Image: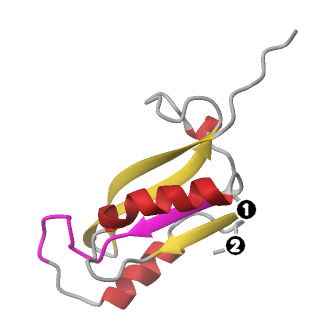
Amino acid sequence: MEEALPAPKVRLVSHRKNIHGWPTDSISIDFYKGEADNAASSSQNKCKPNIILLFIPGNPGLIEWYSDTLVKIVEQLGVGYAVRGISYAGHGAGDDVIGSADDHKHSFVNTSGHHDAKM
């Protein structure tokens, strides 16, 4: 008798990126095949999303503030959904930022690399 494969599990990955010249905290929440908590989980094990929810926080502008809720939303929506989110420019990144927040968000959307999924 064959052993059943484990159901895909949600994994949150935090990043610090330079977006439009500004240090920015961001998150990716995806389903992974196998052990989602395993540090060895790779992009090979990531389930390809059909729909990506783009989350830009309100006040506070720290993406980490919302991460637990966003994980729960993705878990409830199921495989095929993912989240990408970013903090406000300079919020949580430890640097003072001067510039246009609109340019910052626009650069994030254009460089997210998910042109084959709906946002």
The reply to whether discs 2 and 1 touch (Cβ–Cβ < 8 Å) is yes
**What residue is at 34 percent from the left and 76 percent from the top?**
20
Q: Residues within 10 Å of mark 1 (few under 14, many from 20)?
A: some
Please give the label number shown on residue 50.
1
| Residue at which label 2 appears | 118
Amino acid of disc 1: Asn
User: On the rendered structure, is 2 left or right of 91?
Assistant: right
Q: What stretch is highlighted in magenta?
A: 82-96
Residue 100 image position (x, y, % from top left): 29, 90
Q: Which colour scheme is used?
A: secondary structure
Look at the image and say whether residue 60 sits in the magenta stretch. Answer: no
Q: Residues within 10 Å of mark 2 (few under 14, many from 20)?
A: few
**What residue is at 35 percent from the left and 54 percent from the top?**
15
Which picture quadrant has residue 33? top right
Residue 41 image position (x, y, % from top left): 52, 32
User: On the rendered structure, is 36 left or right of 16?
Assistant: right
**What residue is at 63 percent from the left and 36 percent from the top?**
45
Residue 102 image position (x, y, % from top left): 38, 90
Q: Measured along the vertical axis of the image, is residue 82 above or below residue 119?
A: above
Which picture quadrant has residue 26? bottom left
Please give the label number shown on residue 21.
none
Amino acid of disc 2: Lys
Q: Mark 2 falls on what kind of element?
A: loop
Residue 71 image position (x, y, % from top left): 49, 56
